[in-house]
Amino acid sequence: MISKLLFERTSVPDLEKSLDVYSARQKAIANNIANVDTPEYKAQRVNFEEEYKKYLNKTSIKGKLTNEKHIPTGVMDFNKLQPQLDYRRSSLNDSGINNVDIDREMAELAKNNMRYEMSINLIKKKFANLKSSIKGR
């Protein structure tokens, strides 16, 4: 009960999920960079933001189930949201080998790294605030 109040009603689950997404995206970008010279390799990408936006929109309508046979309204299980790996549909780049653009991948890598670090710092701050309130300061 107490852990539910402390962790499920805060942004910690969102931040935890963002770390999972950024980790998956890091692996996809690393695969793209490693295969920059592989003929006919298709660049990978991780999709999550679109599904997360749908989740946020659906949770704005709240309903209460009074019987387990009732159909839930506007409630979507946050834990079921997972990053989806798919392939970039762009055509071959200038090299003619595949559709991996090394400049684009390096920019995505830097952006993803900054987002990961930001999420880590926000989680640190949340737990520091929790620790401070437990100590009474």
Image (cartoon, grey):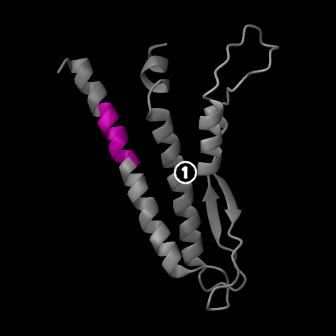
Horizontal side of 125 relative to 136 (left or right) equals right
36 or 100: which is nearer to us? Answer: 100
User: Could you tell me how many numbered marks the image carries?
Assistant: 1
**Picture quadrant where residue 85 is located:** bottom right
Q: Is residue 111 magenta?
A: no
Q: Main secondary structure of the magenta part?
A: helix
Amino acid under label 1?
Val
Image quarter hosting the C terminus? top left
Which percent across, then down, holds residue 76?
67, 30
Horizontal side of 133 relative to 106 (left or right) equals left
Q: Is residue 125 magenta?
A: yes
**Picture quadrant where residue 3 is located:** top left
Return the residue at label 1: 21
Please provide the residue range marked out in magenta.
119-127
Q: Residue at x 65, y 67 (%)?
A: 44
Which percent across, then down, holds residue 33?
54, 76
Which percent across, then down, holds residue 112?
46, 60
Which percent across, then down, holds residue 82?
64, 45
Q: Residue at x 47, y 24 (%)?
A: 9
Most extreme residue toward the bottom is 95
Horizontal side of 69 relative to 95 (left or right) equals right
Q: Residue at x 70, y 62 (%)?
A: 86
Most extreme residue toward the left is 137
Most extreme residue toward the right is 69
- Few, some or many C-alpha atoms within 10 Å of disc 1 (few <14, some 14-19, many ≥20)? many
Q: Is residue 80 above or below residue 84?
A: above
SS of the residue at dot 1?
helix
Q: Residue at x 37, y 46 (%)?
A: 120
Q: Is residue 22 above or below residue 27?
A: above
